[in-house]
Amino acid sequence: MHALRSARLAAALLALALAPALAQDAKVQPTERPFLWVIEGDVPSFVYGTVHVPDPRVTTLPAVVDQAVDMADGLFTEVPMDAGMQMAMMRHVMLPPGQGLSTRISPELFKRLDAYVKRKGLPGAAAFEQLKVWVTGMQLQLLEFAPQLQAGGKALDQVLYDRARKAGKEVGGLETLQEQLGCFDVLTAEEQARMLELALDALEAPDDGKRVAPFEQLIVHYLAGDLDALVESLEETQMGTDDEEAAARLKKALIIDRNHRMAERIGARLRDNPGKSYFFAVGTAHHHGEEGVVALLEAQGLKLRRLTAQDAGTLKKVPAGAR
């Protein structure tokens, strides 16, 4: 029963993107500074930075992004986001048979986790029993989106993927789930437990009226279009750990190595399909710096230019016969 309960909880929390669409608030205005780059050429393609949350402020797209999606012949997210992803994901986030979260962390930490999730209206830490330690920590951070989940919210990446699929476009992923989720295997059991402890520390901190929810600061920087501030906010948390060596190890596996892999696959797809236009949507942090996806694509000889909301209407679809 614990395994089944854990699977159901993980499916609800992890698969933000697989739920029906959240109704958009008419008052929500799209950002004026989207993280959208055009890869210039006879047939332009696009690189877009996302935040993997179901917040309407994020999922309300600027017109220039709408136009880029409409122009593209195919759309690729980090991993394929089809209906089979949820079950495939479960195989990567659950502990092996015979193992449980309660045996991977101290009794004191498990008791603390139990008390916290019960205060949030969940059945207790036993619901997480079959999940890996790092997964549990991430799910705690996502609890702030419980209202959106209950309303059927889905993350920006899934909004884009579903839209492209519905339009009959080619869809797919730049990575496999194993490549993406396997990054956390660089952390020891002790390091994962410490990350869970720190997540609880942050969530249980007294609210002095100035406290910012874990994802809120990222969303603020995202809407402002400030890539440096967004990444700085992430780095201030040292990837969720207070161990500098572990943070560096995780950053290399989770960000840098994946940047190189995704940039190589984007470049290869463009070279192999010169007559097609593509829209590549990956987490915004992957576009930052000299080893970010944008810089790595430029190193391949591609010319990229960041667009703004004012570029809406300037994008023109290349007729199929002219390609």
Image (tube, rainbow, N blue to C red):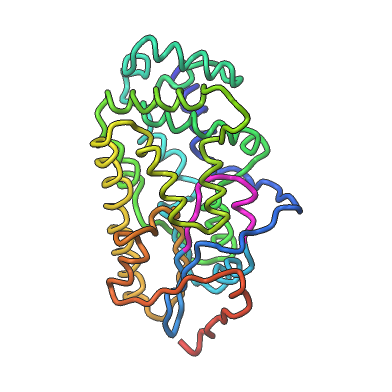
Q: Residue pushed farthest right?
A: 26
Residue at (52, 18) in percent of width and height? 116
Viewer can see residue 1: no
Tell me where the magenta segment starts and ends, as one range: 48-61
Residue 283, percent across and down? 44, 53
Quadrant housing the C terminus = bottom left
Residue 62, percent across and down? 62, 64
Report the number of discs: 0
Q: Which sits in the foreground, 309 or 67?
A: 309
Residue at (31, 18) in percent of width and height? 104
Residue 253 picture quarter:
top left
Q: Which sits in the foreground, 36 or 261?
A: 36
Magenta highlight on residue 53: yes
Residue 53 picture quarter:
top right
Residue 194, percent across and down? 33, 24
Residue 84, percent across and down? 46, 45
Residue at (61, 46) in percent of width and height? 55
